[in-house]
Image (cartoon, rainbow, N blue to C red):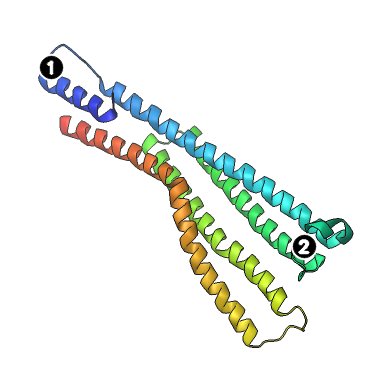
Amino acid sequence: MEINDLKSVWKKANDQEKPGYWVSEEDVRGMIRKKSRATISDVLGQLKQKIRMSGVIGSATLILSLTSIFVPDASDNFVLNESLTNVQYGIMMMTMSLCILTISIHTTIRYKQVKNLEQSADSLKLSLYRTRQIFQKLIKAGIISDTIITPLVMVFIAGFKVYANQAFLFDIRLFYLFLAAIILALFFNRLAAYLMKRKFGRFIRALDSRLQELEALESEEGQIG
């Protein structure tokens, strides 16, 4: 039986005051509370998965970058682009690793915030609202990171190719690289927003549904009172 059905039965029983199928206010509130806790647990599970993935990828990329810089002979097989030296490749990979590890740290902080809300004495409605805010901030941070990291790496590689045989100069080539960075950033921003909405939108919708259920229940309680 859905939450709305339970509320309907509960309201009808209160209105008619007849024996029969009885669902108390506490039953409805308990079910909403149970679904709300399950939603928050899903959010925590998703955050934990993101922490693990970004931590593993970031650490592996950092090790690869350090190997390329300080043990170049051991990393020759990893350099796939002949226009990059091992040191250049290592710097590029280190930039990526630092960005990914920053995401991991940021996600860890958000995870702890949601965990603290789950265990706090705050009202369920307030916990849901704050969890939604935290998750939205995490999605926004993910979009920003995707907007920056991929274009940065691509322009980084292009820059080494453009200046491969010449010393760095402030000329028209730098303008083209800058223009390419802007176009790539705009493209990956749109792409990241779409992918984030597709991947994490269901969590936001679930939190919204729980908040709407609580608000509907509080509204009915006010009318009955």
Q: How many marks?
A: 2
Residue under circle 1? 17
Q: Can you name the residue that lies furthest to the bottom here?
A: 171
Q: Is residue 170 above or below residue 92?
A: below
Q: Secondary structure at mark 2?
A: helix
Q: Nearer the viewer, mark 2 or mark 1?
A: 2
Work out which quarter of the rendered image holds the C terminus and state it: top left
Q: Secondary structure at mark 1?
A: loop
Residue at 58 percent of width and 44 percent of height: 50
Q: Nearer the viewer, residue 94 or 133?
A: 94
Relative image position of residue 69 (x, y in whole percent): 83, 62
Q: Amino acid at mark 1?
A: Glu
Q: Nearer the viewer, residue 7 or 2?
A: 2
Can I make out residue 56 in this image?
A: yes
Relative image position of residue 180 (x, y in whole percent): 57, 75
Residue under circle 2? 90
Q: Residues within 10 Å of mark 1 (few under 14, many from 20)?
A: few
Work out which quarter of the rendered image holds the N terminus and state it: top left
- Residue 165's mark? none
Query: Which of marks 1 and 2 precedes in the sequence?
Result: 1
Relative image position of residue 181 (x, y in whole percent): 57, 73
Q: CA distance from mark 2 to mark 1?
A: 75 Å
Can I make out residue 112 in this image?
A: no
Residue at 52 percent of width and 63 percent of height: 188
